[in-house]
Amino acid sequence: MKYTDLKITWLVIFLIVNLQVSSQVFIPVDKVLYVCSYLYEFQQDSNSNTSLKSQDMTLQIGSSVSRFTSTNNLYNDSILMLYSNEKPTAAGFGKIWQQVGGNTTHPFCKPNIYKNYPARNQVLFTDYLNREYLKVVENPVFNWQLKPGADTLVSGYVCHQATARFAGREYLAWFTTEIPIQEGPYKFHGLPGLIVHLRDTKDQHRFTLTSLRKVGYNSHIHMHERDFRQITAREYAKALNASFAMLYNRIQQENGLAISDDEQKARALQTTKARNNFIEKY
């Protein structure tokens, strides 16, 4: 089995699980007022500055709640909701596969992040990892330090600069008061304007706003309601690394995998080993 086949296998499992319960899990928590598109560029291997990856991400902003996740996740959710009444049969699966089969999301970008949910000032982080639904509920505090005189033009907006430390990294953020919304990518928020660009000081993780639009139709921010096990952010980072280690060992031992091509196996091992630079460091 080739490594690309492994990725497809995991996508198939994801779709089957979601098709079986999709009618029960999408709970509207707020109406979408704005949609911000970000390009997330990151160095997946901390030991290689050529291991650059990118993913299109979306920030949905409501009157109180926001959701940040990969653009692929939102598209997949919309398809699953469209076919929520389909029975978990081969025919039902086939309809969905035709529309989402080519959408792949990097493991670093799979989680859903809700701000001001389940309560004000709380951040809810959810993911499906190691065959388990996990959630982190926290109250991250960003002690932003504004840098007067560092104004610049970013993505067509006049931006001001601020710095903060979060989860083991130092960050530089450029925000604009032209859009007076205290929001931003990932868990970042709390500045007097939308974050247009953000990166860590080692330039291993960066987010850039690529578009912003006001939503003029009835659209909702949806929460995936599952039987989550609650853990801490530190425990999640540990579990993520453990999942890569488990996959590495499985590929190495060819446990349940019909890998006959040594070159494909070596590539799969290298790719899995390289995923060691998650945005949060503990």
Image (tube, rainbow, N blue to C red):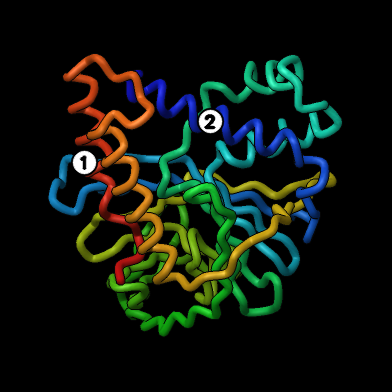
Question: Would you place residue 177 above or below residue 99 in this image?
Answer: below
Question: Would you place residue 175 above or below residue 207 in this image?
Answer: below
113 vs 143, left or right, is right
| Residue identifier under label 1 | 51
Could you tell me residue 24's position as x and y percent? 81, 47
Which of 75/27 is in front?
27
The three-letter amino acid code for the residue at tag 2 is Leu
Say which quarter of the image contains residue 158: bottom left
Residue 178: in sight, yes or no? Answer: no
Could you tell me residue 64's position as x and y percent? 73, 69
Identity of the residue drawn at 47% across and 49% down: 130
| Residue identifier under label 2 | 11
Residue 131: in sight, yes or no? Answer: yes
Question: Would you place residue 75 above or below residue 130 in this image?
Answer: above
42 vs 114, left or right, is left
Mark 2: give few (<14), some (14-19) or many (20+) Cα within 10 Å.
Answer: some
The three-letter amino acid code for the residue at tag 1 is Ser
Which of 170/78 is in front?
78
Which of 229/149 is in front?
229
190 vs 53, left or right, is right
Identity of the residue drawn at 47% across and 37% down: 105
Identity of the residue drawn at 56% across and 47% down: 58
Helix, strand or loop at label 1? It is: loop
Instruction: Classify the position of the C terminus by image quarter.
Output: bottom left
User: CA–CA distance between discs 2 and 1?
Assistant: 23 Å
Could you tell me residue 116's position as x and y percent? 66, 72
Mark 1: give few (<14), some (14-19) or many (20+) Cα within 10 Å.
Answer: some
